[in-house]
Amino acid sequence: MASPPREGKKKEIYKYVAPWTVFALNWSMRMDKRWRLAIGSFIEDYTNKVQIVQLDEDRGELMHRATFDHPYPTTKVIWIPDPATHYPDLLATSGDYLRLWRVDSNGQVHPECMLNNNRNSEFCAPLTSFDWNETDPNIVGTSSIDTTCTIWGLETGQVLGKVTGSVRTQLIAHDKEVHDIAFTKLGGGRDVFASVGADGSVRLFDLRNLEHSTILYEDHKQLPLMRLSWNKQDPNYLATFAMESSEVCID
C-alpha cells in the first residue's frame, strides 16, 4: 500500500543580504503586514539608509519593498506597536533626532515628523536609543548622551491627519550617557520604564512619581551598560550587558 504523499515542508530560514552593514532592525507587529522588517544601515557618511523588506510567501524569499534616506546611522528602528491596526502605519527611528515615518497604502515611505527637544541650541545631543510603549502607542521614550531620558506624547490617532508630538517630561536619568531605555509591563504597562547608562547602573522610573528612582543593578566593575530588555513573559526579570562583555546579566 502506497504511503500518502507528505506535505512539502515550509522553509524555516530566510536570508536577506542588505547592500550595506546592518546596524538596526525591527519586526512589524501589524497583522495585515506579516513578516515585514525594517533595517537600518551603518555607513560612515551623513546619508544613511533604511530599508523595508517583507516575506513573499509564494516565492519563499524576503523581498525589498522600499528604501529611504536617513541622516546618520539609525541607533534604533521600531514599528508602531499596533497589531490590530488602529493607528496609522508608522515607523520611528533615532539618531540625531527622533523621526516618525508613514508608510502609505502603496508601500511608499514619507517623513511624518521630527521631534527635537533642543530648539534653543545649534547642536543636538545624539539619541542612543528609544522605546515605543506597547500599552499606549501615544508614548515614546528616548535616551541620549546628554544623561537624559525624554518622554514624548504623540498624537497618532489620525489616520489621515498629520502625526505630531510634544515633550511630556525630561529627566536626568544617569550620571553619564544613557545608552538604552525600555518600558515594562509592571504597574499597568504605561508608566514604568528602566534605563541603563555609562555609569554602570540600571535605574527604574515611574512617570507618576519622577522625584525618585530605584537602582536595580550596578555593575561591580562600573563598566558602561549598553542595552536592556524586559522579559516578555515575566516583567519581574530584565537582562543587560556591559561594554565589551560576553556576559548577560539577568536581574
Image: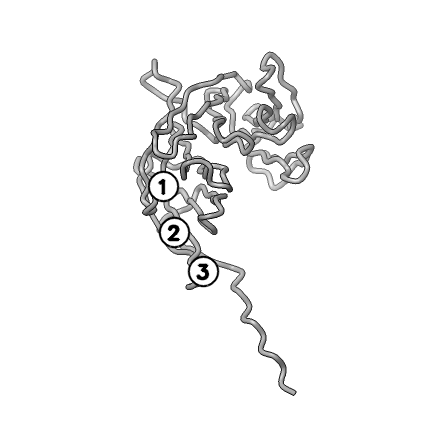
Which residue is tagged 1? 103
Query: Is there a contact, CB below 8 Å, between mark 3 and mark 1?
Result: no
Viewer-side residue, 224 vs 64: 64
Viewer-side residue, 51 vs 240: 51
In the image, what residue type sits under mark 3? Answer: Glu
- Place of residue 24 in the rendered image (x, y in percent of width and height, measured from the top left): 45, 41
The label number, if any, that marks residue 57 in the structure image: 3
Mark 2 against mark 1, which lies toward the viewer?
Answer: 1
**In this view, 160 is above or below 187:** below
- Place of residue 212 in the rendered image (x, y in percent of width and height, measured from the top left): 62, 14
Residue 180 visible: no
Q: Is residue 16 left or right of residue 182?
A: left
Viewport quadrant of the N terminus: bottom right
Q: Residue at x 68, y 37 (%)?
A: 234
Residue 158: name its quadrant.
top left
Viewer-side residue, 237 vs 137: 137
Q: Residues within 10 Å of mark 1 (few under 14, many from 20)?
A: some
Separation (CA) of disc 2 from disc 1: 20 Å
Q: Residue furthest top?
A: 211
Which residue is tagged 2? 18
Q: Residue at x 40, y 29 (%)?
A: 98
